[in-house]
Image (tube, rainbow, N blue to C red):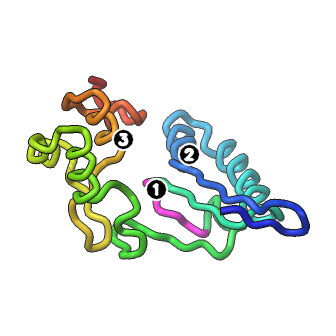
Amino acid sequence: MRIWLYGRMKNIILLDEYDTPLQEAWVNGYWQEMTDFIRGLFNSTFKTNSYLDRAVMTGITRVSKESIFSDLNNLEVVTTTSGKYESCFGFTEEEVWQALKEYGLYDKRQKVKDWYDGFTFGRRPDIYNPWSIINFLDKRRFSMYWANTSSNGLERV
């Protein structure tokens, strides 16, 4: 989506895992420096940016409007228990079954469900991890693909 205003395009910013640098800062002892930096970055990126139309930030840390977000307004917190966008945070089972059919792997659907199903958003069960499904379709083998995407100390496969 592009919105033009006075000949200039308004932008949409998608910021995934906004909280990862903050978690690292807390663990490694530079919390104050990082929060000062993030607060300034978020102010110039999300509050005073005249080229911004809208933004989406994802993370696992609950948004607190009293901390790094104190300068921001009009925040809408959508959590895993919210009904809004409940089928947009992963692949639905219907989408996964269709992909398995297209890749000739439909007979693997129960094992795919056992390995990669497990998310419920809002009231919508059977939401699948996109990274795992895409990697399974590509490599045609079961593995903990999601474990290789974080810095949480999980054993890498």
Disc 1 and disc 3 in contact, CB within 8 angstroms:
no
Who is closer to the viewer here, 99 or 56? Answer: 99
Who is closer to the viewer here, 12 or 75? Answer: 12
Measure the alpha-carbon separation of dots 1 and 2.
9 Å
Query: Sequence order check: which comes first, mark 1 or mark 2?
Result: 2
**Most prominent secondary structure in the magenta stretch?**
loop
Measure the alpha-carbon separation of dots 2 and 3.
23 Å
Residue placed under numbered mark 3 in the picture: 131
Residue placed under numbered mark 2 in the picture: 22
Quadrant of residue 60 in the image? bottom left
Relative to 25, residue 125 above or below: below
Q: Specify start and end residues of the magenta stretch as a single range.
A: 60-65
Q: What residue type is labelled 2?
A: Leu
Query: Sequence order check: which comes first, mark 1 or mark 3?
Result: 1
Residue 113, x across and y down, in percent: 15, 48
Marks 1, 3: nearer the viewer? 3
